[in-house]
Image (tube, grey):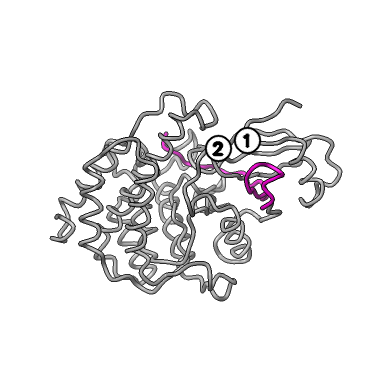
Amino acid sequence: MDEIRGVRYAAVLEFFRAHVPDAADVAALEFELIGDGRSNITYRVSAGERSWVLRRPPLGHVLPTAHDMAREFRVIAALADTPVPVPRALALCEDTSVNDAPFYVMEYTPGVIVGGTGLPEGFADTPASRRAMSLTLVDTLVALHAINPEAVGLATFGRPDGYVERQVRRWSQQWERSSTGPLPEIDELIRRLRAALPESPAPAIVHGDYRLGNIALDPSDASRVVAVFDWEMATLGDPLADLGYTLIYWADPGEKVEALRGIESGPGMLTRAEIVTEYAKRSGRDVSAVDFYQVLALYKLAIISEGIYARFVAGQTLGDKFKGTVRHTGLLARQALAIADASADAKLRG
C-alpha cells in the first residue's frame, strides 16, 4: 500500500485493529479525502462495506490551541444522547508516534451537505422544503444552546466568563502568528471590536463553526439533520457567537455570493433577518447586538482564511480543491467593516 499523505498507513491500520470497534479483523484500509479540508483533515476510511471517518490536524505548523483532537472527540462523545445529532465517537489516539499528530475515529454518517455551490440538484427543490431546511438549521442551533453543559459532562469544557473579549484577543494573536503580510483592515477590526464588546447572555455550548456546510441532512427529508460535524472550535461561551457565524455564511435572495461566504438562496429559504427573528423567538435571547457577532465572525473567518493561505503557500495543504488558492483575508475583513459601518452601534461604526 502506497503511503497516503497525512497517514502513516501501517501504524494507523494497527491502531484500527486494536481500538476501533468492528475493525479487529480488517486486512487493509482505504483512505479518501472528504470535506473541504481547509482546517482539520478528514478521511473516509473503508474496509469492504465498513466505513469510518478519521480526523487529524492539518499538516505543518499548527497554531496554539487550534486543531485540538481530544476536545473535538470529547464534545461529540458528550453530545451522543442529546437532541443534537452527532457522529458516534469511536476511538481517540493522542500518541503522536502513531501518526505524527493526534487523531480520532468516528462513525461515517452519510447525508446531504449543502456547500458553497448551492443546493444539490433535486434536493430541497420546493419553497416548502427550503423553508423547512432553513428552520431546521435554526432549531438545531437552539437545541445545542439549550443543553446544560454540566448534564453532559462538559461543565469544565471552557471558561465562559469574558468569552467575547478573549475571542477578539485570541484571534488577534493568531493573526500575528499566521499573517503573510500587513492588512490595515484587520487592525481596524480589532480596534472596533474591542470598543464595542457587548454584554453576553448566559453561557452555552458553542459550536464555533456552525453553518449548513457542517451539517448532514437526510437525503429524503431536508427538515431532518443527520449529523452536525466539525466541532474543533467548540467550547463554553456566548451562544450569539454561533448565530453571527451562521449568518455570515448565508446569502439573501439575489445577493452576490462572495468568496467563502454564503450559498445561493432559493425561494422559500429564510433571509438573514428571518434567521435572527426565528432564533430569538425559539431561544428567548436578546439578539439586538447581532451586528457585533457578525463582525466578530467575519474577523475570525478572515484570520482562519489567512492561516489556510499560509499553509497553501508553504505547500502544506492536501487535495485538488486548494489549486489556485488566493488570499481572501482582505475581502472578508472588508465585508466585516461594511457590516460595522452600517450598524446602529456607534462604537462598532468606529
- Report the residue at 41% width, 52% height from top: 134
Q: Which mark is residue 71?
A: none
Instruction: Report the residue marked by disc 1.
Output: 6
Q: CA distance from mark 1 to mark 2?
A: 7 Å
Q: Position of residue 146 (x, y in %)?
A: 47, 70
- Report the residue at 58% width, 66% height from top: 82
Please tell me whether residue 302 belongs to the stretch shown in magenta: no
What is the magenta range?
94-117
Quarter that holds the N terminus: top right
Q: Position of residue 287 (x, y in %)?
A: 29, 65
**Frontmost residue, 48 versus 121:** 48
Label 1 neighbourhood size at 10 Å, few (<14), some (14-19), many (20+)? some
The residue most toward the right is: 25
**Frontmost residue, 199 versus 9:** 9
Please tell me whether residue 116 belongs to the stretch shown in magenta: yes
Judged from the image, the secondary structure of the residue bearing numbered disc 2 is loop
Instruction: Report the residue marked by disc 2.
Output: 59
Residue type, mark 1 in image: Gly
Q: Is residue 249 visible?
A: no
- Report the residue at 29% width, 41% height from top: 332
Q: Position of residue 141 (x, y in %)?
A: 45, 60
| 149 is higher (above) or lower (below) than 180 | below
**Frontmost residue, 54 versus 240:** 54
Label 2 neighbourhood size at 10 Å, few (<14), some (14-19), many (20+)? some
